[in-house]
């Protein structure tokens, strides 16, 4: 079975690609709950400034209404600013390296895209959300999110179509924007050992009790960590919140991003020469870049504007709606290797000459979406209450793309200057539109002094069309559901059992054998131990996901939709804060992904590429009490398969990260981060024998921050 990451549509490569009670809905927009040593700010929309490493924070991810994390009947991780900044993350995916169930750096050190897998399935295209609204991506039609503009990153593991419609069955990542409210004053200057520097600022203030503003920005420029790679990028995220005389609160958010850079050179490399040493020249340098410095180019211009509206009615119910418009213009030109000379999988000469393919695309993406929710609590009598939610979710996604390729000269493994290529006529020149409308309902029933039963039902209508030579028009619809039962004990322990179904519409022509959305179901059993006001939390979950109607085949042999895949696994995650200043946070994930049906019978029983069966991470931080905090992290990824036949393996690896922070006083702080301390050369995964990716080497960054 050919399981391809669907962002890159090159035909050659793709032939291979706290307490146990609910937060009251009637609470004002920013109430403070003091739980002993723990202070949480709760917001009705919950997409707000709650630090994710607290014991049991409120969240709307997994429920679309504010409940405590322990009451979401699925496995959820909440990462606040402290966790995002722990080891100097420069991409959102880097911040998730210590999160259970999430595989990051799937295609190595790619600085312009967040490759993610959750529970073994690709999450970066149909499983990324911004403020609980989908950031759909197809081919190169994506939106880049700078982690400095985020207050939290929340990961919802498992099938979630009952709330979110067509989405990744392994789970989703919800990026939560920084919001206005209260005084914010921060500026930061940073540098790294590659030769890059950056400026960050986060400013905000209340104008009065009904109005507040905030503006966040980041500008970075200089050298990257691999050869030829350099450039400039910047993000600006202004926001404004106000309340009307009728009590409606409106938050306006904008996010502007501009990048003019080169490409990394650590991916699309052959198996022999990266994973396995060659007799001819050893290994390909993990910093080598085989593109042309004069022709290579990466240009991104994007903007999103969002409005979040919240209104509390006299009957105790509340309306929350988010609407967003987005535009992205991305143009790229670069060379990537495709095996050795003659497109061979092994070296054909002593120098290890590589075959290069030139690639260029121009992609423009336009999005419009809205998610409207009406929810509240109904007293059913006899100690029974119903937390009801009714929602309408609408999304329009349009991608106008031109893709073309060409050939350059062979490149010696450590020296390259292929020049400007001659590109063939575009093989893809089309505009694709997908419209999705979903109606959903949720009832979370509380009864019997601790029982919580959650029921969800949603129906979606999806219309997809594409013009151009391979144009098509397809209509799909699907019903999704979730049923869960949990019991919240007084000591903070909440076991749960959940069954859910899902679907994922595929943007592929019926002429290619794709006539239905992917579909399937999931069983999950877990327990969350989150004592209110405590100094620790622990979660555990076991799951089984059955995925059907999976696209199989490839560009040359044709596609079909008879594939079936099963993912089973166990996840553990927890944190413990000792009284002496030491805190520990760890995660461990065991995942078994198996092909259960395929047009190629020889692949049945195999494991898809890019799916390690074990990942673990442990981070420790010690606060000395004099302003100094030291941190250390350990990340491990087991071996994975490098080809569909499962005859080649990628080695396991273990990496060490360090951090140090010193508060000088008067709001001045210095932060040092070192990732991959030993500069260990490692391959994060191979999609095929032709597409292997080096992970990041040692990276050192230093930032000086002033809060005022």
Image (cartoon, rainbow, N blue to C red):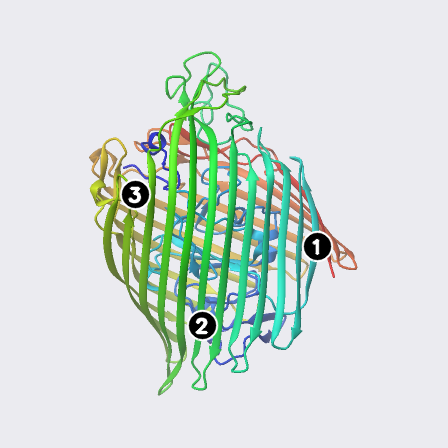
Q: Is residue 644 above or below residue 190?
A: above
Around disc 3, counting alpha carbons within 10 Å, would you say few (fewer than 14), some (14 to 19), or many (20 or more)?
Answer: some
Residues marked 1 and 3 touching at CB (< 8 Å): no
Label 2 sits on a secondary structure element that is strand
Position of residue 667 relative to residue 425, above or below, is below
In the image, residue 368 above or below residue 245: above
Which residue is the extreme one toward the top? 350
Task: Tell me where residue 87 appears, x and y as whole percent.
Answer: 61, 47
> Callout 1: helix, strand or loop?
strand
Query: Gap between marks 2 and 3, in whole Å?
Result: 40 Å
Screen quadrant of the N terminus: top left
Give the quarter of the figure containing the C terminus. bottom right
> In terms of sequence position, does the residue under pointer 2 or pointer 3 come before the other?
2
Query: Crowding at label 2, few (<14), some or many (≥20) Cα neighbours within 10 Å?
Result: many
- Label 1 or label 3, whichever comes before in sequence order: 1
Reading the image, the residue beneath label 2 is 320
The residue pinned by badge 1 equals 187
Q: Which residue is mark 3?
A: 594
Q: CA distance from mark 1 to mark 3?
A: 48 Å
Q: Is residue 552 left or right of residue 398?
A: left
For label 1, the crowd category at 10 Å Cα-Cα, with few meaning under 14, some 14 to 19 and many 20 or more, is some
List x then y, in percent, for residue 62. Answer: 41, 64
Of circles 2 and 3, which is in front?
2
Q: Which label lies toward us, 1 or 3?
A: 1
Residue lying farthest to the bottom in this orientation: 381
Disc tally is: 3
Measured from the top left, where is residue 528 in percent x and y? 45, 64
Q: Could you tell me residue 559's position as x and y percent?
A: 23, 38
SS for tag 3? strand
């Amino acid at each position: 079975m050919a399981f391809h990451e669907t962002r890159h549509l090159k035909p050659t490569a793709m032939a291979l690609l706290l307490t146990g009670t609910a937060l009251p809905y009637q609470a004002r927009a920013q109430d403070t709950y003091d739980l002993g040593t723990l202070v949480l700010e709760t917001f009705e929309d919950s997409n707000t400034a709650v630090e994710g490493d607290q014991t049991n924070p409120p969240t709307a991810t997994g429920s679309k209404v504010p409940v405590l994390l322990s009451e979401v009947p699925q496995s959820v991780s909440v990462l606040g600013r402290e966790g995002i900044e722990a080891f100097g993350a420069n991409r959102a995916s880097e911040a998730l390296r210590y999160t259970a169930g999430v595989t990051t750096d799937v295609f190595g050190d790619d600085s312009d895209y967040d490759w993610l897998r959750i529970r073994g399935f690709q999450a970066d295209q149909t499983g990324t959300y911004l403020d609980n609204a989908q950031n759909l991506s197809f081919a190169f039609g994506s939106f880049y999110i700078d982690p400095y503009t985020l207050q939290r990153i929340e990961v919802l593991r498992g099938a979630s179509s009952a709330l979110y419609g067509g989405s990744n069955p392994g789970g989703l990542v919800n990026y939560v924007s920084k919001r206005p409210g209260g005084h914010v004053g921060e500026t930061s200057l940073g540098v790294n050992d590659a030769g890059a520097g950056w400026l960050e600022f986060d400013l905000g203030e209340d104008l009065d009790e009904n109005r507040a503003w905030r503006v966040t920005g980041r500008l970075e420029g200089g050298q990257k960590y691999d050869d030829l790679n350099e450039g400039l990028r910047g993000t600006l995220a202004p926001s404004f919140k106000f309340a009307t005389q009728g009590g409606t609160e409106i938050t306006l958010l904008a996010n502007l991003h501009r990048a003019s850079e080169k490409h990394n050179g650590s991916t699309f490399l052959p198996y022999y020469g990266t994973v396995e040493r060659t007799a001819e020249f050893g290994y390909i340098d993990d910093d080598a870049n085989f593109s042309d410095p004069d022709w290579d180019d990466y240009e991104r211009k994007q903007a999103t504007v969002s409005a979040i509206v919240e209104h509390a009615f006299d009957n105790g119910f509340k309306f929350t709606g988010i609407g967003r418009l987005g535009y992205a213009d991305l143009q790229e030109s670069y060379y990537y290797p495709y095996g050795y000379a003659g497109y061979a999988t092994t070296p054909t000469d002593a120098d290890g000459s590589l075959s290069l393919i030139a690639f260029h695309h121009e992609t423009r993406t336009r999005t419009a979406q809205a998610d409207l929710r009406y929810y509240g609590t109904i007293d059913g009598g006899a100690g029974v209450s119903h937390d009801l939610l009714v929602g309408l979710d609408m999304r329009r996604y349009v991608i106008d793309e031109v893709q073309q390729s060409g050939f350059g000269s062979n490149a010696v493994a450590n020296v390259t200057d292929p020049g400007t290529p001659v590109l063939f006529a575009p093989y893809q020149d089309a505009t694709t539109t997908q419209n999705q409308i979903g109606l959903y309902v949720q009832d979370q029933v509380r009864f019997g002094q601790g029982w919580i039963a959650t029921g969800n039902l949603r129906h979606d209508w999806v219309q997809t069309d594409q013009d151009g030579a391979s144009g098509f028009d397809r209509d799909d619809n699907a019903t999704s559901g979730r049923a869960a039962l949990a019991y919240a004990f007084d000591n903070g322990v909440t076991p749960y059992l959940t069954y859910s179904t899902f679907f994922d519409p595929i943007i592929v022509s019926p002429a290619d054998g794709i006539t239905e959305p992917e579909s399937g179901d999931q069983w999950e059993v877990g327990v969350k131990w989150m004592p209110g006001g405590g100094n620790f939390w622990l979660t555990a979950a076991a799951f089984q996901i059955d995925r059907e109607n999976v696209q199989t085949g490839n560009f040359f042999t044709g596609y079909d939709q008879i594939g079936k895949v099963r993912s089973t696994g166990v996840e553990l995650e927890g944190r413990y804060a000792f009284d002496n200043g030491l805190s520990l946070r760890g995660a461990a994930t065991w995942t078994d992904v198996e092909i259960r049906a395929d047009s190629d019978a020889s692949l049945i029983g195999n494991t898809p590429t890019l799916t390690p069966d074990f990942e673990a991470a442990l981070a420790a931080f010690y606060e000395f009490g004099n302003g100094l905090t030291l941190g250390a992290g350990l990340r491990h990824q087991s071996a994975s398969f490098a080809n569909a036949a499962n005859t080649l393996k990628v080695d396991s690896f273990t990496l060490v990260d360090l951090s140090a922070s010193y508060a000088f006083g008067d709001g001045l702080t210095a932060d040092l981060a070192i990732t991959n301390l030993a500069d260990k050369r490692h391959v994060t995964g191979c999609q095929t024998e032709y597409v292997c990716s080096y992970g990041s080497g040692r990276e050192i960054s230093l930032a000086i921050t002033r809060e005022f």
